[in-house]
Amino acid sequence: MDRETTLVLINEVGIVPLFYHADIEIAKEVINASYRGGARAFEFTNRGENAYHVFTELLAYTKESLPGLSLGIGTIYDAETAQKFIDAGTDFIVTPCLNPEVGQACQKANIPWIPGISTLTEIYNAQQAGAEVVKLFPGEVVGSAFVRAIRGPMPKVKIMVTGGVQPTRESINEWFGAGAYAVGLGSNLFPKDVVAEGNYPWIEQKVAESIALVKEFRGK
């Protein structure tokens, strides 16, 4: 999927689920449920020894079975690891921190790079390094007031908020009201007990509800 299409999907849907599991079948079920719920960009996090193997299988599966889904990899710290996932075919890369070398690798591959930031200086440096969208993390620590405040000096900045976002009307309204470009949702969409029980209809419903809340807010 091309760079612009991925960025448009992230913004239009507004919700980017993020998830990791070492079991490929569970990961497939979670992505399927998210897709049925309306998610069109999904971040698989690089948080386990088996992550690369699972991710490559997921990529092959989603390209064949889930049309229009942009699948990216998260929790990438260095350019070497980024290149490994770029070669595998990732649609985008999300990093917890700001490493311009990862940005260079993504620019060369013409895929979106979404680096983690928590200050105005980091946002500026990320933009200088080629980031079109930045990830505010941890959202619950930095707060929505930060997103609102930086609209003054940086009115065009595109921020995806991750960390502490809840799949509730109050939380969605708070972050999008502050000016978020999108939000990333992890454990609040995929509670461990729900995943363990294989309650995928619950996940589908929660994803659909969250996306509907974004549309409701934007339609006001």
Image (cartoon, rainbow, N blue to C red):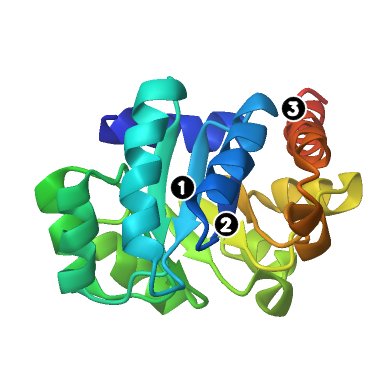
Task: For marks 2 and 3, give the CA distance.
Answer: 23 Å
Name the N-terminal-most of marks 1 and 2: 2
Vertical placement of residue 81 versus 180, above or below: below
Vertical placement of residue 205 versus 98, above or below: above
Which residue is disc 3 drawn over?
215
Mark 3 falls on what kind of element?
Answer: helix
Of circles 3 and 1, the one toward us is 3
* One can see residue 161 in this view: yes
Vertical placement of residue 46 versus 212, above or below: below
Name the N-terminal-most of marks 2 and 3: 2
| Location of residue 70 in the rendering, given as x and y in whole percent from the top left corner | 41, 35
Q: Quadrant of the C terminus?
A: top right
Q: Amino acid at mark 2?
A: Phe
Decide: few, some or many residues near mark 3? Use Cα within 10 Å; few <14, some 14-19, many ≥20.
Answer: some
Q: Quadrant of the N terminus?
A: top left
Which residue is disc 1 drawn over?
156
Mark 2 falls on what kind of element?
Answer: strand
Which residue is disc 2 drawn over?
19
Which of these two is toward me, 121 or 187? 187
| Location of residue 200 in the rendering, given as x and y in whole percent from the top left corner | 75, 40
Say left or right for 207 vs 90: right
Q: Amino acid at mark 3?
A: Lys
Q: Amino acid at mark 1?
A: Lys
Say left or right for 187 vs 206: left
Residue lying at 74% horizontally and 27% vertically, measured from the top left: 215
Which of these two is toward me, 158 or 36? 36
